[in-house]
Amino acid sequence: MEKTRIKRLSKEFGVFKVLADKHKVEFNADVVMSSSVADTILAFASSQKAELIVMGTRGRNGGPRHLRLGSVAIDVSQRSNIPVLLVK
């Protein structure tokens, strides 16, 4: 199962790489297996000396009056030492 997922992700990243090259935008992709997604994102951002973390949200909890964010997005944004841009 994991090998199939990694193969599919690699193929998708290849498409993104072609588009990035076409528009002269730097693009890097890594597939990382982890039990804590937030910890992995924060560690990777730190190791890359990132200046900004951009991540999508797809939280499904909360009522219609509340901004709905996923638990990973909340965790990363609260614990990060660098700015985090959350895209809904």
Image: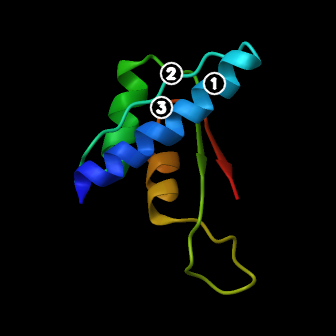
For the residues marked 3 and 2, what is the alpha-carbon distance in whole angstroms? 10 Å
Tag 3 residue: 81
Q: Amino acid at mark 2?
A: Ala
Closest to the camera, between mark 3 and mark 2, is: 2
Q: Amino acid at mark 3?
A: Asn
Query: Residue 1, how many percent across, how many down?
Result: 24, 60
The amino acid on which the numbered mark 1 sits, given as a three-letter code, is Val
Q: Quadrant of residue 67?
A: bottom right
Q: Sequence-wise, which precedes: disc 3 or disc 1?
A: 1
Side of 84 where 39 appears, left or right: left
Earlier along the polypeptide chain: callout 1 or callout 2? 1
Residue 54's quadrant in the figure?
top right
* Among numbered discs 3 and 2, the one appearing first in the sequence: 2
- Pointer 2 residue: 50
Query: Which marked residue is nearer to the observer: mark 1 or mark 2?
Result: 1
Residue at mark 3 to residue at mark 1: CA–CA distance: 32 Å
Residue most extreme to the top: 24
- Where residue 79 sits: x, y (%)? 43, 44
- The residue at the point 37 percent across, 30 percent down is 44
Kindly state the secondary structure of the residue where label 1 is placed. Answer: helix
One can see residue 61 in this view: yes
Among all residues in the image, which is located at the extreme bottom?
A: 63
Mark 1 crowd level (few <14, some 14–19, many ≥20, 10 Å Cα):
few
Quadrant of image for the C terminus: bottom right
Q: Which mark is residue 18?
A: 1
Q: Is residue 52 visible?
A: no
Q: How many marks?
A: 3
